[in-house]
Structure formats: structure tokens, C-alpha cells
Image (cartoon, rainbow, N blue to C red):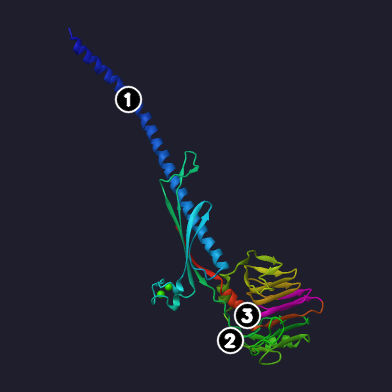
Amino acid sequence: MQSPKRLRRRHEGTKGSAALVCLTALLPLVVAGGTMLAVVVRGRTALETELAKKSAADAASSGAQDALAKLQGDPDFTGSYDVDVGGTPARVTITSWTDDKVDNDELNGVDDPGEAGFVEIGTEAWVNVVTDGNGNRIDVPSRRFRGSADVLLKRLDANVAIAQSAYVDDELSDVDFQDAPFTISGVDTNLDGSAGPLPDIPGIGVPGDPAAISAQVAANASASVLGSGGSPSVVTVAETDVLTLMNHFIKAATIHFNGTDDDATGALGDLATMTPAIAHAHGNLRLHGGVTGCGMLLVDGDLVIDDKFDYAGLVFARGSITFTGEGGKSLHGALLTTGAILGKDLHGVERVTVEYSSSVLTTVSTKLANSYVLVSWTQR
Ligand SMILES: [Ca+2]
Ligand SMILES: [Ca+2]
């Protein structure tokens, strides 16, 4: 007979086996449950990290946008400040490379001429974010994520050496107004019509033989091309790299026409207060309805100036410039084109006038020198 003790032991052994069988049967489920749990936890952490990093980077980026707006109002501002971006604080620092006693470009020493005009915006934002099981953000103090943006700007050099009132890049381009009255004048004239301070320059400048354009002007009894070097004042001048100039100023444009054929009405910059703006059309542009403006108008295609027009500054066109329709049209400053200058279907007796104005160009370039061109934007 087996002793009760031994029996008990065997019984316990059987119980142990049953428990083991039971555990084995459960194991795949437990493991599966554990794996799923681990995936959920890792997923949530990755989501939370991603969200927090993105929030921090977005906040830093918004801080940099705020700094850009600040510089637009006060181009000389330097220093640090905090800005609240939808509940997230961002620290913004604006530094002028010109005089910060730092060799920012690591070239030619501290605050050398190569650093002149550069302004750096640095922003930093810290975000605490954890998500709940539904992916909603909850704020807990346990995790912090840093976002930063570093933006480098350069002041715009808006000085253009103007050697004629109207520059026509191609000697074979037409300057044809179909007998309608027009004046292109290189006689320096202020915005109010009084005499400007500088000597006369040519009315029309061409980097080649001016004969063909001169003949077209002479054939129009209502044409008046005034200035130095002859009557009509159509003169050979040094070639101007119109496209390079345009590409330089396009970077500082604040008014954009992005279509292949766009219309503009209203104001392009403020003529009354001589507050310039740089407007850029990627394609052809038609002005109508009495456009006024101040600054620079850059047109990658053909420019059509319809109805009344009054503008102070520089007009650039890669294509032709056509004056048409009702109303007087005045440009105070200068124009440059790689195409033709045309007058078509001009109604009434009001003139098209393109008049060189050194004072207008100085005012425009001085004020535009307060604008910045984006050099680089780095975000983390
Ligand atoms: Ca410096
Ligand atoms: Ca340096």
C-alpha cells in the first residue's frame, strides 16, 4: 500500500501537471496579448513623439514668421522676445550680423563687409505633449520636445544704375505707337513735374545700333523722345543685364501674380505716400481700371497697360510693354524691356509718358532697402 504521504505527493504532482497544461494552453494568448500591448504602447509613444516634435517645430516656425512681420514694421529691430503661438511659447532672437561682434560667416574676421546687411532670426520652442488612448493630446510635464528655426535674411540692395529712361535690350525691337502721342524723356523730372537735380540722360537706350528704333520714332509726328545725345534721343548705351536684375528683385517681391495670364487692378504699392512694393508676375500681366503704384513691377511675360496708369519706380518686362485703351498713362522713373514698346488702340488725346526721375528712383531704392530677401530657412 502506498502511504498517504506519497499519495498526496503524487496527487500534488498531477495537480502541477494540470496547472502546467493549463499555462501552456494560455501562453499563446498571453504572449499575443503582450505583443499587442507592446505595439499599442510603442505606437502611442511614436505618435506622441511625432506630434510633440511637430508642434515644437511648428511653434518655432511660427515664431520665425512673427519675427519676419516684426522686421517688416521695424527693419532695424534686434533683440529677443517671447511670442505665444497657440499656447506654446516661442523664444525669438533677431541678430544683425553687421555689428554683433561675432564672425558669423567664419571668413575675414568679425563684422567684416561680407557680413553687412545680413540678419539672422533664431527661434526655439518647447512643447510637452502626451496623447491619450484616442490620440488626443494631454499635457503632462514628463516629456519635453524642442523645435527650432534658423532664418537668414539679407537686406535688399535696390540701387539700379539707370542710364536712360527706357532701355530696349534688342535693337531690332519695335518702338511703335501707331501715330498715337507719346513721350519718352531722359530729362530728370520730379514727381510734381518740377526739374530734377541730375543732368539729362538718353530717352531711349539700346545696346546696339539705334537707327531702326530712331526711324520708327521719327515716323510718328506725335512722338517726343527727349534727352541727351540727339533728337530723337535714341542712343547706344552699355548693355544692362535685365534678367539678372529682375531675378534679384523678384526674391523680394511681396505682390505676386502666379498665372500665365493675370489681371491687376487697384494699387501696386502706394503712390500717394511713395511707399514702394515689389510686384512680380510669373506670366503675362494686364493692368486696367486705373492702376496706380510705387516700387518695382517685374513681368516675366508681356505687360499690357490698359486704362489710366500712374506709377513711380521701375518697370521691367521680359516681353513687350504695350500701352492701350483710354486715359493718360504716366511712368515716373524708368523702364527696361527685352521686348518691344508698343502703343495699340490708344483712344483720346491723352499721352503716354515715360519720364526719368532720379528723385523717384532714389526714394524707391532707399525705402526698398528696408526690405529683406530670404537667404535660408532651416527648421528642426
Ligand atoms: Ca558679425
Ligand atoms: Ca566674417
* Quarter where residue 345 is shown: bottom right
Of labels 1 and 2, the one closer to you: 1
Q: In the structure shown, which secondary structural element does the residue marked by tag 1 occupy?
A: helix
Q: Quadrant of the N terminus?
A: top left
Number of other residues with Cα within 10 Å of mark 1, as a class: few under 14, some 14 to 19, many 20 or more: few
Q: Tag 2: residue type?
A: Ala
Q: Position of residue 325 (x, y in %)?
A: 78, 73
Of labels 1 and 3, the one closer to you: 3
Q: To which residue does mark 1 refer?
A: 23
**Majority SS type along the magenta span:** strand
Q: To which residue does mark 3 refer?
A: 361
Q: To which residue does mark 2 refer?
A: 238
Q: Position of residue 248 (x, y in %)?
A: 55, 73
Residue 8 visible in rendering: yes
Q: In the structure shown, which secondary structural element does the residue marked by tag 3 occupy?
A: helix
The stretch in magenta equals 322-347
Q: Tag 3: residue type?
A: Leu
Alpha carbon distance from label 1 to label 3: 89 Å
Residue at the outermost top position: 1
Q: Is residue 340 left or right of residue 110?
A: right
Q: Position of residue 374 (x, y in %)?
A: 52, 67
Number of other residues with Cα within 10 Å of mark 2, as a class: few under 14, some 14 to 19, many 20 or more: few
Alpha carbon distance from label 1 to label 2: 94 Å
Tell whether circle 1 marks a residue whose Cβ is less than 8 angstroms from ligand 1.
Answer: no
Alpha carbon distance from label 3 to label 2: 20 Å
* Residue at (36, 29) in percent of width and height: 28
